Amino acid sequence: MGKTFRQSMAWLHTWSGLVVGWILFAVFVTGTASYYRTEISQWMRPELRYGRTFGPAELAAAADRGVAYLQAHARGARTWFITLPRPEMPVLELFWRTGPGRPPGHILLDPDTGALAAVRETRGGDFLYRFHFELSLPPLWGRWIVGICAMIMLVALISGVITHRRIFVDFFTFRRRADQRGWLDAHNVTGVLALPFHLMITYTGLITLSVMYMPWGLNAAYRGDTQRYYVESGQITAPRPPTGSAGELAPVGPMVVTAISKIAQPLERLTIVNPRDANSTVVAVFEEPYGLSHQNPQIAFNGPTGQIVEIRAGDLGPATATFTTMVGLHEAHFAGPALRALFFLSGLSGCAMVATGLVLWSVARLPKKAAASPIPLGHRLVHALNVGTVAGLPIAVACYFLANRLFPVAMPGRSEVEVRFFFAGWLSMALVGLLADARRAWIVGVAMAAAAFFAIPAVDCITIGYNLFARTYDSDAAFVAFDAAALFVGAGFSFATYVLVNRRAHPQNFRQSASRGGIIET
């Protein structure tokens, strides 16, 4: 580990960053894309007409149609969730849970007729959003893995600041070279450029799931009754236990109208608990008010009578308000277009920071005379994982978008096919990194990423019949921005391909070069 404190921090920074770097890169890429989760979902459902506004009467009628469908097809479910139509998602989304171990139900309906919506089956931006903190694993496992990696990320950030004694000076000394010094400078620049963002996003990410990671205080105070904690902290309305007696649910349309008249926020969804019980509850959940705090005003109704039982309008205590502010900072729902773009660019900087750190570890440990010394197996494995992650994950994201356009709209299980295409693209690049030599693997990887992102607008034009210029004329902002972003990312990978093809690395002793920047080789 080294004899001095800085040497110990250098060892900690190097190995902590490597061990979790590949997962962190995936978390950063999908988390950064999630800042435009809504726009991604809109692009992946081109059949819908976005921008339509719904008045209270239309929302009430849509809610009644949703309840009618659930009563016909999900009578045995314990909880119904009805997401009401809104300008960015003009369909009625139904979700229901029947019990532990049973698959939930999910369907999209036309809000005007109650018929199945004529829209392709896809997870849209929600897949990338959930992958960001669950890695497409069972939720408990995925969140624990991401949480542990985030904790190590926080350690790596702090130890990196301590290790790089000239980190802020070196930020203004970027040398465009293909050797270790160049990679170190790139790592420093991308790390320092958005260092406050990196620290904030890592810490607040841990806070969002702090109850799961550190449950001991809550268990001691509430003896495991987490629901009572959320009620007393003002985050949810009080639950009403079922009586076991059958009951009829009153029409929810009037409840929707009443709820909208009480709180001046857009109504987001209805949660109906124990819908066939005499003590059923209908909870109207509103969008969060503008501001840092992530809180949703709620109104609870007695299901059989339609009378208001409880109103939660954001009266939170200091501790809960601090927690919801941390969640709001992480998710950035408060951000306008300019600030959201800044969050997105900072997220890209985080991706570059992790990627350059992974490559730097590999480059710094290349044999001094590669022709005379065979590359160790461990180094080859790290190289394959680097290529498979840094180049493979963008390719996987592009494959996910391409699958949305290439597969038939009516294909059964279509959303799962899109996800499989995502992992197939990722795996194919990992195999390239494992089988090809280092230089060729990187060239192939970034060239494939450029081609995949350039293909997105082209395939979009062929399959949907629109092109970027036509959509600009029609002022379809979400589609224009998506296709333009794909071209921008493709151009970035094209430039990287050009650099790799035309640039030769300048070998140099890393110990002498890195020591000037405050790094000690371990």
Image (cartoon, grey):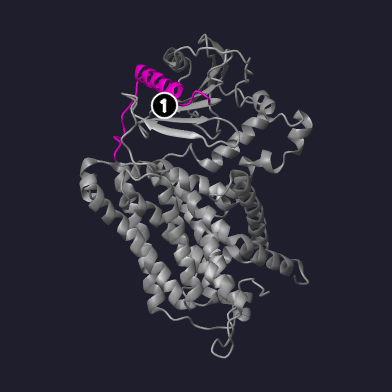
Task: Estimate the x, y position of residue 418 in percent, counting from the top left.
Answer: 40, 50
For residue 71: magenta? yes
Q: Quarter-wise, where is residue 109 in the image?
A: top left
Image quadrant containing the N terminus: bottom right
Nearer the observer, 123 or 451: 123
Q: Amino acid at mark 1?
A: Leu
Q: Main secondary structure of the magenta part?
A: helix
Q: Which residues are magenta?
A: 47-76
Q: Quarter-wise, where is residue 368 in the image?
A: bottom right
Report the residue at 76% width, 66% height from top: 5
Q: Secondary structure at mark 1?
A: loop
Q: Quarter-wise, where is residue 242 in the image?
A: top right
Vertical placement of 86 versus 336: above or below? above
Task: Estimate the x, y position of residue 506 in percent, counting from the top left.
Answer: 49, 82
Vertical placement of 401 versus 265: above or below? below
Q: Which residue is mark 1?
A: 84
User: Which residue is the extreme one toward the bottom?
Assistant: 372
